[in-house]
Image: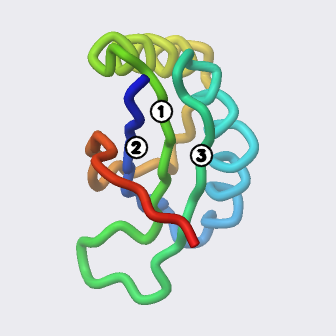
Amino acid sequence: MDKYVLVVGTNCSDAAREKEFNDWYDNIHLPDVLETPGFMSAVRYENTNPAEGEAKYLAFYYIETDDINGCMKLSGENIGNKSKAGRISPLLKLISRGVYKQTSALYK
């Protein structure tokens, strides 16, 4: 099974509501995304000094699948359904998104 990481850069559209945004992302959005088959785990990071136009937050979704295109299609359908159910925050501002296939690993 191949390993991938989906990297998503986001910002909060209203700095005054950043705590609310992070609460939604950590407690609602991450679990919703991880319902997609193949999505194994997720980690978020905060850029402590983002430049203008850069994402303040990065989410890494670790994926294991033999069919990344099918997996990403299922993910899109899952998030589309969550959006229709009102589970996507209006505070979410997508900055960047990319899927990367693991080519090597070194652990200490």
Residue at 56% across, 15% down:
37
Indicate the quadrant containing the C terminus: top left, top right, bottom left or bottom right.
Answer: bottom right
User: Mark 1 or mark 3: which is in front?
Assistant: 1
Q: Would residue 54 be found to the left or right of residue 28 on screen?
A: left
- Numbered disc 1: secondary structure: strand
Of the residues under marks 2 and 1, which one precedes in the sequence?
Answer: 2
Q: Looking at the figure, which quarter contains the N terminus? A: top left
Q: Position of residue 77 (x, y in %)?
A: 43, 11
Kind of residue at badge 3: Ala
User: Pointer 1: what residue?
Assistant: 63
Whether label 2 touches label 1, CB < 8 Å: yes
Q: Disc 3 to disc 2, how far (Cα)?
A: 9 Å
Question: Element type at marker 2?
Answer: strand
Where is residue 93? Give x, y as percent.
Answer: 39, 51
Determine whether, in the image, residue 100 is placed left or right of residue 46.
Answer: left
Q: How packed is label 3: few (under 14 Cα within 10 Å), some, or many (20 or more)? A: some
Is 27 left, or right, of 53 in this rendering?
right
* Residue 88 drawn at (x, y percent): 55, 32
For label 3, the residue is 42
Q: Which residue is mark 2?
A: 5
Cα–Cα gap, marks 2 and 1:
6 Å
Which amino acid lies under the numbered mark 1 shown in the image of this protein? Ile
